[in-house]
Every structure is written in structure tokens, then in C-alpha cells.
Amino acid sequence: MQHTTLQEVLSTHAQDATERSALHCWDGAQREYVPVSYAALSRRAFAFGARLMAQGTDGELPAGSVVMIACHSPYATLVAFYGAISVGAIPMIFPMPLSLGSHEALSARIEHWGFAFERPALLVLESGLVEKFHDDIPAAIKTVRLSDDPAAEIDEQNAPARAHQPLPEDVAFFQTTSSSTGDHKAVAISHANIIANVVGIRHAQNMDANERMATWLPLFHDMGLVGTVLFSFCNDYPLLIMTPTQFVKRPALWLKGMHEYECTIATAPNFGFDYCSRLVSEKDANEMDLRKVKHLFIGAEPIRVSTVHSFVEKFSVAGIGPQVIRPAYGLAESTIITTMTDPDKVSQFVCLDADAIGINEPVTVLDQMRFDDPRMAQHDSAKSIAVCTAGSVIEGMLVELVDEQGELIEGEGIAGEIAITGTSVAMGYVGGRENLVDRFDQGRTRTGDMGVFLEGELYILERLKNVIIRNGENFLVSALEEHLADLLDISHEHVAVFESDIHNPDSDIVVMVERHGTIDEDAVNRLLVSMPKEAFPINRILLSKSREIPRTTSGKKRHFYCRKLYQKDEIKHQQSIEVSPQRIVQAMKALDTQA
Amino acid sequence: MNDNATIEQRLTNIIASKTKLEAADIHPQLNLEDSGLDSFARIELILVIEEEFSIELSDSESANVATIADLTSLINEKTAAS
């Protein structure tokens, strides 16, 4: 049966007596996966939905109420998420302090979103977190506790607590789009968006009914939530799940789980594959059999050719071949997936002349090779950039390239900003009290990514939007700049934050600060001291004279050109400060002495 | 036997090696969120601590320890229980 809403998917699972598929949650203490069938998960979600309903006035939570979810455990997060959906509430999953850098950052989110709507949002917290946040949560925000233990006794019920059948075009959930300090941006995803994307992915990949998945991705991230968890839930695929922290501690567990449960699909950003290549031992790789794996989807951040090469080289002994490495492109604004590579052929990359990349400019292809090309390891050259294919557009979607004025660019090989329309394009950005959703103009979203079509496949070239992507997480540059400017007590117009190389996830994140007048040493020290509390690792601060940040004629900062200048060592600056723990402590001491 | 002073000393050594801070700058009230480590490095630090003390810290426990003193108490509790 083709479902049209997540509510229908939940009801189907809840009534499934076979309990065929399950969410398998990694228990770090017991060193084993604890299964919870999708049937039990759905029935627990229905029971939790009843608890949410009880928080409303006279036991009636109005449909469209927002439910904020702040839980470490994927299990608790999903009981709360599906529970909210089951009663027509709108769930919104928050990153946790280990991702955000501090508890204060989570408290700030709770305070912002808690009062952003007509009614105060509810807050779901894992039991262990309640005391930690007790004093920080405003009294007007009601909290609901939830156990993080899948094996704990918990109520189940067979039907949703509200006889509410959402329409496919109704909001299903809110997806936050950035992890940066102080940024409060989210998109509204409808039930129809989710179903369209799930169907589009499955059809594009010729998947059957017997796939199995494994993930460690965070559920506040679209790739983790939609691309993995909702995808497996809607398709009734078993899913092994661990937290990002568990993965970072022991990356081999992800792959060992895939070996043990004969998984066929996994999804991760470049970071995950790179991390496994570096940290999983040869012994572990030798003991794994990953020949069942059909698709290793890689996306969410720029894909490095060297990562693909190292991963295949390391795990070829386990049966991983270059044909299973499957680049894809998408973003929260398109629910998740927009383009995917063809499952029947080996993906490829092109080497492009780096100096010839610009909007409405033809790209110059210097070389191209497939992931199984023996020359792959030696591709790199100082003059070119290697860009992996992102594949072809999935069904129901249309990708166009536009120039800076939004005019359509036609013809292959000419770069432009990627604009997307179609069934998976989200409803719009989350508004507030007046307007719950600010809809995208004509259902189209301009991505802020520069791309080019070559032989019908999309290649992502540059990032025009001011976003920094690290470990698959997005940090909105404008919010970072405002925050840093506040610390320096100057206007955000005089601060530019940029990555030194968007194709290298280990490259420096640089803050360029224009000295408009003078910046006293204390301000710089305050900024340095604040660094550890931030989720983004800034590596270098450049202090320059005024008007050194490259700008457009209308005065907008050009981060793309900052990057180009930095790469050529042509940014004019007076002082360069490397951000390190020693330098931070030095700053702390200086401030303490003053105090 | 792990008393708090011994645990604290071992923690100080681990944190000094991860952060390159001087041992004199590491004290019980030092907040890990102020230690100069980004979120990724903090997870790596937790892993080293787990291996040093042969314990497992959940995500929730890892996030809830603010200071070195908190961490010392948690390790004491965990090692006593094991």
C-alpha cells in the first residue's frame, strides 16, 4: 500500500503482528544492539502521544502545537518524534550540548523556539537531562520526561490518542537547517514531501523489500532523520542505529554492525568515510565481510576524491568496491535528496580548472575518471580541483541553474546557482506567530550552491551561500559573524568568516576582522575565551585594516573571494592569531589579571 | 583503590596531553566547556578517559559533566560500581 502521510505509516506498523522489522539501538554499556520492532515503536509513540495530549488545556493539545525534542538517545528521540506526529503536533529535534558545544547553546534554542509560536512549545527531555536544565527552562514551557532505555517498561497503545488524519500537504515536522550559534532557522516539511522523497530515492536506486540499513548520523540532521531513519521506517527496512558520539569513539562498530546484520545500505558525510579509513584497524577490516553492501551514500558536505580512494582501498579486503560509493546531493530545503548517482554504473569525478569557475562561465574539464580508475590516487594537481559527480535528478524534482539575477542558464558545462522545484521541495521556512510557514516563492528554492551539468550529471562547484559545513553540520556564517562581532564590540559588517577550502573538510576556518578604528586586546581575548563554548572550530583570526574584506559594488561581503585571496595568501592583514588551547588560556589569564 | 585525588591527577595528565595546557592551569573547577577543546575533541577526550579507567560513559553522562570535579565524582562512582 502506498502511504500518503507518516501517520498512515505509523498505523500500518502498529498493526503489524509479524513485527518483521526493527530499530536496533546500540547499547554502549552492554555492547550489543537492543531491538525495538517498528510495531512496538509505533505503539509506544501512540502512548507517548497521549502523554503529550495530556499537557494541553483540559487534556487537549491543539493540532499544530510544536514539540521540541532534546534527547541524546535515538530511541527516545524517535518515540517523541513519532508520538508528536501521531497526535497532529509538529516535532522539532534539537542538537544536544555535545554537538552544540555547551548547555547554554541548547538553552538558547529552547528559549527561542519555545516562544516562537502562538502557543508555547512543549519540551521533551530525556530523564537524565531534566535536572541539568531545571533552572534554565522558563516556567511557561512544559516539559515531558522520557526514558532513554529501549528495554524499559513503557506504555503501548494500538491507536493514536487523537482521531486526526493529517492531509499530505500538512506540516509533518520542522527541520533545523543550521547548527550555528544564535541561528534560528528551520524549514517546514510536509507529509507529502517525506513520502515523495522516500519514493524518489527508492525508485532511483532500484531497491527491493529486503534492504537493511545502519547509521550513526544525528537525528537533528536531515541526512540522519529523513535520509536514513524515516527512509527505513517508511520502507520497513531494519535499521541499526548508534549515536554520533558512539561512532566517534569506536568507528569500527558502525561497519561491524553492517557485517553482523548483513546491511545493504548506509549513509554518511565525507567525514564518516574518512574517519573510518584512518581509524579502523587493518585487523578489523580483515575480519569484516561487507559484500552485502550495495549503496554507501555520501553527501551533506563536499566529497573528497582522496576519501573515496582511501575508503575503497582500506575496505576492499572486506568486499567494498568503488561501485558502491554513491555520491548524492540534497539539503533540508528539498527534504533531503535531490540528485543521486546511478546504481548501475561506477561514479566518477572531474578535474576542473580552478581559475575558470564562476557564475555563467563555462567550466574547463582537464580530466575525468571513474572511481575505479587506477590513476585516481594521483589525480591531484595544484591547478585543478577534483569534483565528484552528484548524479542525476530524482523523480518528481527539477534542477535548474540560474545567474545572479535569477535568470535561467541553459546549456551544459556552464556554471550557475542551483535552483530546485518539485515534490520534495519543503513548504518554506518556519515563520512564527503570524505565519507558521513562509512559503517558498512559486515552490522554488535557490540553494546558494554553484553547480554545473556535465553529461546530464550535476557537479557541485562552490558555495555561494554563506554556510560552513563541518562533519555534515551547517553553520550559518551571518549568525557566526554577528555573534563574533558582539564579542568584539564592533559591527558585523567588519567581520567575515569563511572556510579556506570548501573541498577540504579539514581546512582552516578563518575569521577576518577589519579594525575600524582600533580593536582592543581585551576584545580579542574575550573572543578567544568564548571559542571553546562554540560548536565551530575557528582556526585563525586575521586582523586587518578597514575596508579589506572583499565586497560587491552594493557592499555585500564576498566570502567566495575571501577564500580565493586566502588560498593565494593575498589577504592583507596586520596580525594573524592562531586559535589554540594555549592561546585561549593565555587570553583567560590576561582577562583574569585585568579583573 | 581510586580516591578522588588519584583520579584527579590522572585526569589532569590526560587533559594536559590532549589540550597542551600546563598542569597548573588544570584544576577541579575547570569547566570542560572552557578547556579549549571543540566538541569533537571532547569526545576523543572522553574515549581516552574511558580507556584509562575501564569505564563506559553514556552520551548523557558525557554531556552532563561540567567540571573536572564532576568528572572525578562520576569516575569514582563508575569504578566503584564495576
Image (cartoon, coloured by chain):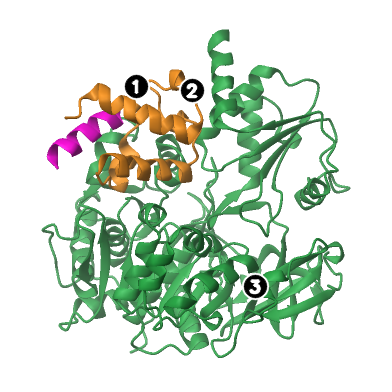
Cβ atoms at labels 1 and 2 below 8 Å apart? no
Chain A, hue in figure: green
Tell which subunit mark 2 falls on. Answer: B
Relative horizontal placement of residue A504, taking residue A320 as reference (left or right): right
Q: Name which of mark 1 and mark 2 comes first in the sequence.
A: 2
* Magenta segment boundaries in residue numbering: B70-82
Nearest to viewer (mark 1 / mark 2): 2
Residue B12 in the figure: left or right of residue A425:
left
The vertical placement of A325 against A465, above or below, is below
Q: Please say whether residue A293 is one of the residues in the magenta stretch.
A: no
Chain at tag 3: A
Q: Secondary structure at mark 1?
A: loop
Look at label 2 and name its amino acid: Glu
Front position in the image: A283 or A379: A283
Chain identifier matching the orange colour in the rendered picture: B
Residue placed furthest toward the right: A553
* Secondary element at image label 2: loop
List the residue tagged with mark 1. Answer: B28
Residue A204 placement (x, y as % from top left): 52, 86
**Above or below for A282 versus A575:** below
> What type of secondary structure mainly makes up the magenta span?
helix
Circle on res. B22: 2
Q: Which mark is residue A19?
A: none
* Residue highlighted by disc 3: A420
Q: CA distance from mark 3 to mark 2?
A: 52 Å
